[in-house]
Image: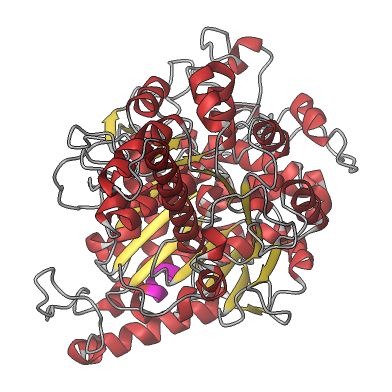
Amino acid sequence: MKITTMSPVQSKVFPLLPELARPYNPQEPSTGPPRDLLVKAKTGTGKTLGFLLPAIQARFNLLAAHGAQAARDVGRAGDSSFERVAALPFARSTVGTLIISPTRELATQIANEAVRLTDKLDPVMRDFGVRLFVGGENKRRQVQQFFNFRNDIVVATPGRLRDLLDSEPEILKAISKTQVLILDEADTLLDMGFRPDIDAIQKELPPTPERQTFLFSATVSRAIQGIAAEMLAPNHKFINCVSSGASPVHAHVPQYQTIVTDASQQLPHIVRLIAHDQLCNPRASKIVLFLPTTKMTQLYADLLRELKTILPARSKTHIYEIHSKKNMESRVRASSLFRQEKDGASILVTSDVSARGVDYPGVTRVIQVGIPGTTEQYIHRVGRTGRAGTKGRGDLVLLPFEKGFLKSLSSVPLKNLTTDELASEVLELAKTHDSDPDAFFADAPQVHASGSRRIESLFPTDVKTLVEEIDRAIDSFKAKVDVEAVSESFMSLLGSCMSRLSVLGTSADAVVKGLQQWATEGLGLSNAPFVSEALMARLSSGSGYRRSSSSFGSRGSGFGGYGRSQGRDQGHGSHSGSYRSRDEESSGYRSHRGRNEEGGYRSYHGREQDGSGYRSHYSREQEGFGYRSHRGREEGGFRSHYGRDQEGHGYRGREESGSNHRSASRPQSSWMGRGSVSRRNN
């Protein structure tokens, strides 16, 4: 492995080697060189390699010391072959490094990096076994792999790990001998409520200082200081990779906010932002589009698949989709493919599962639609772009009733951007392209896989006509929008916003009316969704705002709120005034195409004949409302991770969600891990 330039984290951690990776010595004075680290570092600063390399070296050193001692015990000191064989029983019965990550997706990224790293090191390192314990994968398979192969590195989410420790005594026994514990994104682990799980896991591990511990966190809050005091040795080393004057948001990333004057401008403005990025970054546009709820994410992914023909890159725009209702295989594929995406026009439409930790190289723009959960969430989302010294941009698009959230971003250097200003900029860029397409693409970075430079334009010759037709095309398209998909999105947004009234600084009435305008003016519904008085009472309780009206919308609209039948909330469609809800994964259009879990389409099973209502889930999914936290169990967290092919080198399938990708070989949806195939003899 060749490292030509070290990141800030690596430049401060690597000089501590080899002392940092020395085995524990009970005779060593407490004043010796530190073995525990507290590292303050933002995401995207090379910290994964920064903690993996010392951990791998520490495991290698411990196994070497164990083998050498075994050889001395039988009078074969210096016999390297015997030492290696003698260390194997110890290697199989213990865990070298336990890495705890807050999300499935980040955990799998770390595990993949561990495999790639050890593949490039000394051949002895290639016997290392890497295990991944995350929810959403086959638990029995994970257990079998743990028992059948070495477990030098275990990467886990807290919920699945704690479940295995409670149910598998042999795994508990091996984990109890862990040499190195690493908490990655420690602040996120605490924010997500994983502290009880971390405490329970720590009790099963060797105590400090016998156990070496690394804590990596983007912030060092009082909570982080507290957990550091409990888990780290007194002589631990604090490494600060964030300068004192650093902005909480990457200072070099331009950030813009747009409050649309009415709901009808939201979708055209978002389409123009995408067109603007494709024109500003020809053959390099890579956008992450954040939506506030899962239903909104599903809806907008479908909208953009239908509307991409009016973008400069048209059908060459690849659209990926990640949210809590996608099945594991589909999320694996979307995440992996977007990361690898280099075709020049791609969009990841996502809920907040992609906001923190996972690195998507080359993201040129982050677009946030609606209010983020917190100021920190806004910051973390913007952090997807402008990494490693590259250019980026952030855009925040709000409806009129959401403008109060901007007070929470007073410390962020947001610039105002009107819809007219953006439309003018896009039109001028289109004219520039049309006047000389060859010159427009002269500096485009994309090349064929063979290395030869592409000479054809990614765009049509008349981009100006395309962008001038955006408003008309969207108005025409609204007639095809699925009423049910919009209605379900309305209800998810209603719950999300009603829980944030104090942040919005507005009334419950204003939220309902604003969202009804979004459904009618913004997406073309002929009647506003009905919100019952009972539902408003439930949503408004504890909000601090009084309602001035008892109901909203019309019961005759065909998608009235929560009816008087309990069966509706329980998914039963036999009660009067309701109809069968769609499959959880479906959203889209009246074109008689319902989405399957892969983002493709299946035959549409329309509403029942009475069609006077719909089943909304009052308990929202991850991004909706009324969600009951699992107190740190990752089943309530993120479900994305990378799959593994049979050689353990990462999943390489292709997305099937209408992105026109070619397929690749050896698709395999499940993580296999190092040491999980027959070629591993040890």
Q: Quadrant of residue 596?
A: top left
- Residue, x 63% and y 35% (percent of image)? 205
| Image quadrant containing the N terminus | bottom left
Magenta part, dominant SS: helix
Range drawn in magenta: 272-277
Q: Is residue 249 left or right of residue 648?
A: right
The percent position of residue 324, horizontal first and vertical second, equals 50, 37
Q: Is residue 391 visible?
A: no
Q: Is the residue 616 above or below the residue 309 in the image?
A: above
Q: In the image shown, does 112 or 37 lie closer to the viewer?
A: 37
Residue 449 shows in this picture: yes
Q: Is residue 419 left or right of residue 364?
A: right
Answer above or below: position of 231 versus 54.
above
Q: Nearer the viewer, residue 362 or 124?
A: 124
- Which residue extends farthest top? 574
Is residue 339 found left or right of 390 in the rendered image?
Answer: left
